[in-house]
Image (spheres, rainbow, N blue to C red):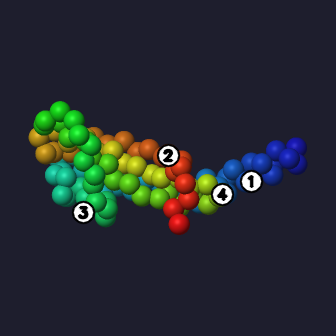
């Protein structure tokens, strides 16, 4: 039982320190420039079909531990209006020193 409580405590503390996705300032119908300003980071365009544009905002997730995690917010635009977004975490292949 003691091992379970220790493991639960470690998991709880690691989850409390993780950052929540910063998608609160996003709203449907925004332009790419407004979304970049709201997120506070530049958007990188991912090539695709004309009129259906996908952009990604990249950052480091600042999760404590021995590994580096990159956070990505994928933004879907149709006719230059925001129609949806997806939040994603990925392990980075190297240490960003």
Dot 4 or dot 1: first in sequence order is 1
Of residues 49 and 24, which is closer to you in this image? Answer: 49
In front: label 3 or label 4: 4
Dot 1 or dot 2: first in sequence order is 1
Badge 4 density bin: few <14, some 14–19, many ≥20, Cα 10 Å: few
Marks 3 and 4, how far apart at CA:
32 Å
Dot 4 or dot 2: first in sequence order is 4
Q: Which residue is mark 1?
A: 9
Left or right: where 11 falls relative to 78: right
Looking at the image, how many numbered discs can be counted on the residues? 4
Badge 1 density bin: few <14, some 14–19, many ≥20, Cα 10 Å: few
Residue at (48%, 53%) from the top-left corner?
70
Marks 4 and 1, how far apart at CA:
18 Å
Q: Which residue is mark 4?
A: 66
Badge 2 density bin: few <14, some 14–19, many ≥20, Cα 10 Å: few
Residues at circles 3 and 2 in contact by the CB criterion of under 8 Å = no
- Viewport quadrant of the N terminus: top right
Residue 90, which numbered label? 2
């Amino acid at each position: 039982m003691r091992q379970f409580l220790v493991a639960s405590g470690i998991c709880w503390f690691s989850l409390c320190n993780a950052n929540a996705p910063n998608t609160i300032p996003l709203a449907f119908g925004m332009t790419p420039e407004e979304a970049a300003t709201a997120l506070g980071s530049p958007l990188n365009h991912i090539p695709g079909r004309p009129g259906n544009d996908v952009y990604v905002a990249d950052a480091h997730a600042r999760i404590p531990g021995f590994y580096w995690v990159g956070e990505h917010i994928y933004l879907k635009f149709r006719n230059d209006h925001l129609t949806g977004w997806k939040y994603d975490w990925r392990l980075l292949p190297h240490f960003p020193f």
